[in-house]
Image (cartoon, rainbow, N blue to C red):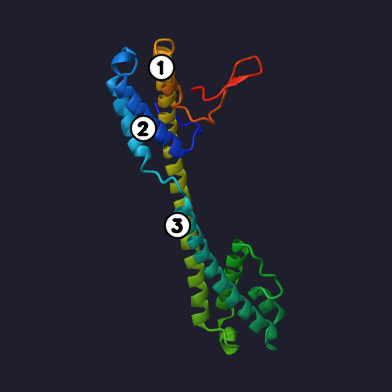
Amino acid sequence: MTNSKKTKWDLSEAIAAGEKALVLSVKYSDLLGGRITQAGTDTLRTDVENLKKFPVDGTQKLVEQKAKTAGKDSSLSDLNLLVGSIRTLVKKSPTATPEMKKAFGVGARLSNSSSHQLAAGKLVVEAYNNFTGWSTTVGILEADITAIKAYIAEFEDKANKQTEAVKAKMDATFSKNSLQRQVEDEVSRISALGVIAFGKKDPAVAQLFEDLIPSHSSPKDNGDGTATPGTPA
C-alpha cells in the first residue's frame, strides 16, 4: 500500500540511498539469509528509477509560474487602463447624468484586486448596453466594449488554466512524495536488516548498511541524554 506520509529526506538523498541499498542487497544477498527477497529488490529498483523522473530542481516550474502570472497581470493592466479612460470620459462629459456616472462606476476606486477590476470592467459593459446611444456620442464605441470583454475573457481563461496547473502540480507532488516515502521506508528496512544480519558477524559490513540512512535523519534517543545519529526510521 502506498505510504503518503511526508518525506524524511531530500529527493537526491532518497535516490542515492535507494541505489546504494540495491547494491548492498545484491552483493550480500547470500549472507542476508533470505531477509531481502528478489521481489523486494525488484520493486525498490523500479521505485528508484521512477523517482528519478521527478525533477530535483523546481527552478523551471518557478519560471513557468511567473510567466503565467505575468500574462494575467498584462490582461488586467490593459483592462484597468481602458476602464479608467472610459470612466474619465464619462466624468468629464457635460451631458452625463448622475445616473450615467454611477452606472459606469465614476467615483469608485479601481483597486489592485483582480476580482474588483473584473467587476469594474463588467460594470462598464453593462452601462454601455444601457446607454448605448449616449455612449457613442461621447466617443465610447462598440470596439472599446469588445476589447473589455476580450481582456476579461483572456484573464479568466489564464486564471482557469493556472488553477488547473496548480492542481496538477499538487497531484504530481503527492505522487512523488508517496513514491519517495516508499523508497525511504524500504531503504530504512534494508538498513535495519543489514545491521541485524552483520552486527556481530561483520561490523564493517553492518556499518555500510547503517550508513544507508542520510546523516541528518532523525536521531534515536538512547534515554541517557545521548543520541545515535542516522538510526533507520
What residue sits 29% from the left and 27% below the top? 42
x and y, in percent, of residue 157 in the image: 46, 62
From mark 3 to mark 1, how far is it between C-alphas? Answer: 48 Å
Name the residue that disc number 2 marks: 19
As helix, strand or loop, the secondary structure at mark 1 comes to helix
Q: What kind of residue is marked 1?
A: Leu
Residue 206 higher or lower than 1, as above or below? above
Question: Can residue 105 be seen in this snapshot?
Answer: yes
Q: What kind of residue is marked 3?
A: Lys
State which tag comes first along the sequence, 3 or 2: 2
Query: Is residue 107 left or right of 48 when viewed as pictured?
Result: right
Q: What kind of residue is marked 2?
A: Glu
Nearest-to-viewer mark from 3 and 2: 2
x and y, in percent, of residue 110 in the image: 66, 70
Residue 202 higher or lower than 138, as above or below? above
Q: Residue furthest top?
A: 200
From mark 3 to mark 2, how far is it between C-alphas? Answer: 38 Å
Q: Which mark is residue 161?
A: 3
Question: Can residue 127 be seen in this snapshot?
Answer: no
What residue sits 44% from the left and 13% below the top? 199
Q: Circles 1 and 2: CB distance less than 8 Å? A: no
State which tag comes first along the sequence, 3 or 1: 3
Depth check, front residue: 178 or 219: 219
Depth check, front residue: 191 or 80: 191
Query: How many numbered tags mark residues here?
Result: 3
Q: Residues within 10 Å of mark 2 (few under 14, many from 20)?
A: some
Q: Circles 3 and 2: CB distance less than 8 Å? A: no
What residue sits 41% from the left and 46% below the top? 55
Name the residue that disc number 1 marks: 193
x and y, in percent, of residue 85 in the image: 62, 80
x and y, in percent, of residue 180 in the image: 43, 34
